[in-house]
Amino acid sequence: MEVAVKGQRIGYQIPVQYKHTDPVLGELYQPLAVVPPVMVNLPPARSYVFADNQPKTVPVTLRAGRAGVSGNLALALPTGWKCEPATVPFTLANKDQELTVNFQVQPSASAASGHSELRATATVAGQAYSRGLQPIVYPHIPTQYLFPEAVAPLVKVDLKRRGQNVAYLMGAGDEVPDALRQIGYNVTIIDPHDLTAARLKPYDALVVGIRAYNTVDRLKAQQPEILKYIEGGGNVIVQYTVARGTVMPEIGPYPMKLSNDRVTVEDAPVTFLKPKHQLLNYPNKITEQDFKGWVQEQGLYYPSSWDPKYQTVISSHDPGEPAKESAILVTDYGKGHYIYTGLSLFRELPAGVPGAFRLITNMISYGKEPAQ
C-alpha cells in the first residue's frame, strides 16, 4: 500500500486479514490463506507397516479449495507395490467440500524389504497437487496454515513372531498399540484395575506403556498381581520410566536404580554383549542393521545399577561418554520373564523403523518355544 505525504509517496506493507468479533474472545484476526484448487490429506504421522503381503487401507481425504473442482486421484507407489483402485475420478461441487477415498495397498512378493514411501496426488486440469492443509488454531496466536506433502512411509518388514494376544497398559500416551496391530498382534488396552494374574493369563505378554510407573497410581496396588502373572509363566515388557516420581520404589521383580542416563545419538553403534542370547536371535536375528534409521534418541532413562539377576544384552554410548549397558534388562522370575527397556520404541515404531518392530517382537515372543 502507498500513501502520499506532501507529494512524497511512501510505501508500506499491511497484512491481509479478516477481522471478526467473538462474543467471548473479542476481536480476532484471521490471515488470508491462498490455497490450491484441491488439497490432499493423509492421516498425520502414520506409517504403513507390512509384515506380510496382506493389503492395508490407506484413506486419502480431498478438500476443495474452490467450487466446481474435478479431476483424478491416484497413489504413487515404489516398485513392487500395488493398490486398488489404481485411479479414482472425483468432483467437488462446493468450496471446502471433502471426500475420502480408501485405497487398498499391498506389497507383491518382489517388493524390497525396508523403508520407502507412498504419495497421493490429485490431478486437476493437467496440474498435479500433492499437498494437504493443516490449520493451527489457538486463541492466543494468529491462525497458521501448514501445507504438508501427502506422503506416508511404507515399510515392509522381514518379521517372524510367536504369540498373538497382547495386553497393553497405557502410560503417558503413545502409539505403540496401533503399531503392534499393524504387524498382526491382537492388542487389548487394559484398565489398571484389571491387572490381575487371572485377567492377564490368556495374554502372551503384557506391554507397559511409557511412564506408566510415573502416572498410573493404581500400579501400587496391582504390582503384586503383575508379579504373580510373571511367576506363573507370563511375560512383561516395561518401557521407559522417568527416574524421579515413580508411584512405587521398585518397578521390577528385583531391584534396579533408574537414572537420567540416555543415548541421544540415534545411530550410535551398538555392541552385542551376549550375541547368542535368545532375545537377540529368536524369532528374529537382530543385527547392527536393526539399529539403523532410528529417530530422536536411541534410548533414555537407563538404569544406573541393577540386581545381578538381570541380564544385559546390548551396549552403546554417545561420543566421549562411557558405555551404557542397561538399554535392555531381562530376567526370569518363576516360570515367566520380565524385560525393562529404555530404548525409544515409542518413537521408532510410529516412525516405521523396521528394526524396532523386530526388537519388540522378540521381546513379546521371549521365552516361547521355537515352532516345531
Image (cartoon, grey):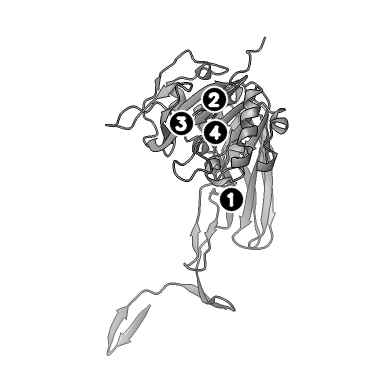
Does the CB distance between marks 2 and 3 fall below 8 Å?
A: no
Label located before the other in sequence (1 or 4): 1
**Mark 4 neighbour class, 10 Å CA radius: few under 14, some 14 to 19, many 20 or more:** many
Q: Which residue is mark 2?
A: 358
Kind of residue at disc 2? Arg
Task: In this rendered view, identify the residue nearer to me: 353 or 314.
Answer: 314
Question: How far apart are the alpha carbons under marks 2 and 3?
Answer: 26 Å
Classify mark 1: residues with Cα within 10 Å, few (<14), some (14-19) or many (20+): many
**Mark 3 is on which residue type?**
Met
User: Dot 2, how many residues are within 10 Å of its Cα: few (below 14), some (14-19), or many (20+)?
Assistant: many
- Dot 2 or dot 4: first in sequence order is 4
Residue 312: image x %, image y %? 44, 22
* Mark 2, secondary structure of its residue: helix
The answer for how far apart the CA atoms under marks 2 and 4 are is: 17 Å
- The amino acid pointed to by label 4 is Val
In three-dimensional space, the C-alpha distance between marks 1 and 2, rounded to whole angstroms, equals 32 Å
Tell me the quadrant of the picture where the N terminus can be found. Answer: bottom left
Residue reaching furthest to the top:
372
Label 1 or label 2, whichever comes before in sequence order: 1
Residue under the image location 49 percent in, 31 percent down: 341
Residue at the disc numbered 4: 238
**Mark number, residue 40:** 1
How much space separates mark 3 and mark 1, taking CA atoms?
49 Å
